Amino acid sequence: MTTFTVMNLRKLHSIFFLAVSITSYAQSIDIIIDEAEQLFAKTKESLVFPSVPTDKDDIQFYYPTALNKNVNLLESELKEWQSKQYKKDIGLVFKTTARYNFRDAIEEETQNYLKGSVRGELEWNILKMGYVYNRLRAKRLQNDIEVLNIESERSQKILWRRQFRIDYNFILNKEVLQLLESFLVFENEYFDVLNSMYFQKLIKRERLIEVSNQIAVIKSQQKILSKENEMITDSVSVHFMNVTKLPLVKIVLDSAAIFQDVEKIDFKEENVRLQHHPMNDLNLSLYATQNYNYSTNTHKFFPSVGIRFRAPIRFNHRKKIIETKIKILKAQEVDKSVGKYNNSITYVSEYNEKLKDLQNQYKSWHILEERIRILKVLKEELNNAETGLLLLELVEEQFKVLENTLQLKRQLYQVIAHLFELNKSIEIQNFVQPFQFEIERNQEVFCLQKSEQYSLAFQLAFLRAKKIKNITVLSSDKSIQEQLKKKNISFVLVDSVKGIRLDTYIRQEVQRIKI
């Protein structure tokens, strides 16, 4: 009887401890599930993909840099002063010589002891190094000024691109830091959830190591980006100092035009001809002198006037030299033009890749959103810890998608800045527009064509008045394309009429007003 009682007591004791353990384990799992659900709900609410396009009127990127930083403009100012100086220089030269005889040497002509002499001469150089030469030199400088003025716009855009790179990197660093701060908070709490599950032997240690390494990477990124922003803060433009977010934009490629310096070749060719002008080898001058000789017997003052002419006797190939130099000049300009087109091809290809990568990130985001939706439905039905863990893994992936998107945005701005530098227009509002991940439906598009009833100038004025921005132009209408590019109006090329004909729309508007 005693033995049976002891055995029963031991069994009851074991059952009691087993029940307590099961209850405690179940309570621990419930706590972990609650923590995971709270972390998911708190984090998911703040995660938003930047797919909402910005208003085009809010895109303000181009702020001209200070003119005192443009070396071309400073050189142009210097050459302007030099040109004025040459124009005022008519070629007058004053010369004077004085001699004194310490040994009482006999002058051969007069047989007198020449004590000293003074000679003053006023010379007017007419050709070489004189009046005509200075006029040619002033004209060459004026041509140099025209070339510098043509190049100054490009130089100004190069300066802008360099400054803009500092500005957009500063702003994007702030965006990334803000995202990393949220990512780090999530990863720390996620690590705590995983640690609790690992303690309960629900997961392997590999996941803990992965999250731990991710936390270390985030902290390292934060230090580097914070340090970079500290270094460049003093160089950031005033306009961008308080900006915290940049919009996603894309280029209107159809209305873009590569910057070509064709007109400056004429000035350079003229300078080559002026440099080898026939008058440059001839020297002609008029002079007037006043002489004074002092000797033992006489003191003589006598004026004189004269003319000097000097011309080299040689056979030259001036015309051939000019022709060859002009050929070299044209070859250099063609090479520069080809280089610009090569750069544009490179940047357009890179731009296309970045747009494709952005669309892929957007697609990845939607896939993750769909998986989260499915898992949430399953969690409501199954309510197990593993499903909650998968939800947190998907949220972690969404953070990485946002991080990749910001990196692509940085690269996209870099490409856009380079392409804008190569573009003729300085109106960046007409060069870029908000990026749309999804094509808008039911958006009115107007086709601009030549009309017998309404002139092109009137149609362009109507576009501005109505603030119509979605314009298409037929590929064959070259004249309209040139006019729109001159007016810095963005458009899209089409092979056939797409959308509403603008002249038809104007006619309908006029009838509506009359009614």
Image (cartoon, rainbow, N blue to C red):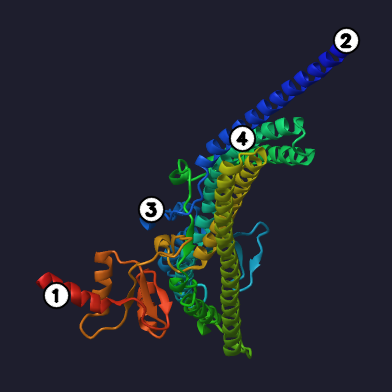
In this rendering, is residue 304 above or below 217?
A: below
Q: Nearer the viewer, mark 3 or mark 2?
A: 2
Instruction: Tell me if 466 is positioned left or right of 273 in this view.
Output: left
| CA distance for labels 2 and 4 | 52 Å
Whether residues under marks 4 and 3 lie with C-beta atoms below 8 angstroms apart, the answer is: no
Task: Check disc 1: other Cα within 10 Å, few if <14, some if 14-19, many if 20+.
Answer: few
Q: Secondary structure at mark 1?
A: helix
Q: Secondary structure at mark 4?
A: helix
Which amino acid type is shown beneath numbered disc 1? Gln
Q: Residue at x 48, y 62 (%)?
A: 250
Q: Which mark is residue 36?
A: 4
Tell me if residue 403 can be seen. Answer: yes
Which amino acid type is shown beneath numbered disc 3? Asp
Q: Quadrant of the C terminus?
A: bottom left
Q: Nearer the viewer, mark 4 or mark 1?
A: 4
Q: Which mark is residue 511?
A: 1
Task: Check disc 3: other Cα within 10 Å, few if <14, some if 14-19, many if 20+.
Answer: few
Which amino acid type is shown beneath numbered disc 4? Ala
x then y, percent, for residue 505: 24, 75
Which amino acid type is shown beneath numbered disc 2? Met
**Disc 2 target residue:** 1
Whether residues under marks 3 and 2 lie with C-beta atoms below 8 angstroms apart, the answer is: no
Q: Secondary structure at mark 2?
A: loop
Q: Residue at x 35, y 72 (%)?
A: 471
Whether residues under marks 2 and 1 lie with C-beta atoms below 8 angstroms apart, the answer is: no
Q: Nearer the viewer, mark 4 or mark 3?
A: 4
**Disc 3 target residue:** 58
